[in-house]
Amino acid sequence: MQHVAQLNPAVEAAPAAAVEVRDLGHIYAGRDGPVPALSDISLTVPTGRFVVIVGPSGCGKTSLLMMLAGLRTQTSGTIMIDGRPIATPDPSRVGVVFQEASLFPWLTAVENVEFPLVLKHAPRDERRGRAEAMLNLVGLSGFGGRYPHELSGGMKQRVSIARGLVQDPPVLLMDEPFAALDEQTRMTMGHELLRIWSQTSKTVVFITHSLTEAVYLADEVLVMSARPGRILDRVPIDLPRPRTYKMMATDVFGALRERIWQQIRSTP
Amino acid sequence: MTRPSPRTVRRLIGLMLLVAWEATPRLGLLPELFLPPLSKTLAVLWSDRSLYGAALLVTLYEVAVAMLIACGVGILAGAIVGGVATLRNLLLPVFSSLYAVPIVILYPIFTAWFGIGSESKIAFAGVYGFFPVMLSTAAGIRTIDEQYLLAARSMGATLPQLIARVIIPASIPTVLAGLRLGGALTIIGVVVSEMLTSASGIGYLVTMNRTILDSPRVFAAIIVVLVMSVAFDILVRTIERRTLVWQTAGRRTSSADAAVPARLATA
């Protein structure tokens, strides 16, 4: 076995791009015939980068994320995650955090986090230990025995993040994870996410409607057009890290936000 | 002075009803033929205990088998109809309409097919209890939040895992509600069919004693049915409480909230 590994160094080395999308297009069957949802999407997310996708409602952001997660199959183009195509969901490569209500209410927080490991038939001690460690990472140690209805909205999303990270995937996909939270909690959670991200060095693809959130979190913001969704602009966010709330008041922050806003506003 | 708890009030009302039951005929407000005193009814029940016991056993046996059929077939059919979209569109409206039919009109047919023994009661009560179980199981499966399924699939769940770990636990609350209703209807079905045509069971005792105007024995049988129904309800409630811990955990007391700062401090 060792020989094989040495003979094939490409397997060992992590690919430079965690997410590689080429000429992606998607057409779905609507009531009045085929509807083009996405077209000409190409994007490269280098390992460890935080990319935020913004765009008008119905531009296919969520469709794109579903395809990156292997939950939906594209009509054309290729998607490589961690150097390999993704045809079906693979939680060891991609963790997904959904908007809300995706925690199972009949399981406690720690049981929710270990759910992906249960599906893989991991031994109980191992998965429990791993889940506890993840809850610790997201700042919820001691809350493992709570049921979701006993947790606040922000805490639920922390559990979701822990669940997305439990198999240590290189890529974390987040579909408007903080959209249902109030403004204060949302700010705190954004800050927490950056802390978790810097501790785990994951590659993050994050969808949001909030431009402030986008600029605050991202290394790069991708602006998508209305249907059929295509990438209109790629805005590098070169604000220093770690990001602070104070940066939101700076001219640079405002200019970046304005640039993205103009792009979205100009789409029909 | 503190306001008495609803529980205390409930018990008081129950006690008052029992007292009224005893007092109304004794004071001559109602003839004993219409309402025999509670004490007399209980005395009859005690003196005829072997008769009532035997009848109860027959009824319980019929109820148990009918419930098994209603719940087993109901859950299975509900799962299939609720889970498969084409079947759902085809059959669910039919079953919903059938549910509205007073199925008791079918009972004469059941006696023709199965005789006047336990079989016809089991068949009738089984069909009677089947509908709510089947319909609520179908509804429970149909109304599962898509988000749960999507999340589970994103975590790599296979179809059997999806069924065992998401669909079943997610539909348990609705299914249990259906079982409660279906079980109650099964008891009604058995007792009613015993009253209509039979030679044994509690329902038979009601009819038989009514025809000879023996009111205390009619009421004694009613008490037995009452106790049986209440016992069933308590049983189902207990099962609900045990299986649905996640719905109520932490809500019974406020101590959970008090524990948060302490836990945060130690974290």
Image: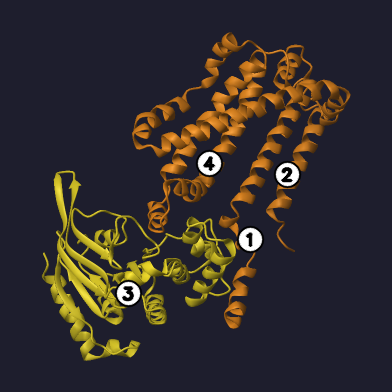
Chain colours: A yellow, B orange
Q: Front-most of A9 and A227?
A: A9
Marks 3 and 4 in Cβ contact (< 8 Å): no
Instruction: Say what secondary structure mark 4 lies in.
Output: helix
> Where does the C terminus of chain B fall, quadrant-wise?
bottom right
Give the mark, 1 or 4, whose residue is nearer the N terminus: 4
Q: Nearer the viewer, mark 2 or mark 4?
A: 4
Residue that numbered label 3 is attached to: A13
Residue B222 visible? The answer is yes
How far apart, in angstroms, are the residues tagged by discs 1 and 4? Answer: 23 Å
Residue flagged by tag 1: what amino acid is it? Answer: Arg
Q: What residue appears at the point 77 percent right and 42 percent down from the top-left corner?
A: B15
Residue B4 higher or lower than B12, as above or below: below
Instruction: Say what secondary structure mark 3 lies in.
Output: loop
How far apart, in angstroms, are the residues tagged by discs 2 and 4? Answer: 32 Å
Residue that numbered label 2 is attached to: B13
How far apart, in angstroms, are the residues tagged by discs 2 and 1? Answer: 25 Å
Give the mark, 2 or 4, whose residue is nearer the N terminus: 2
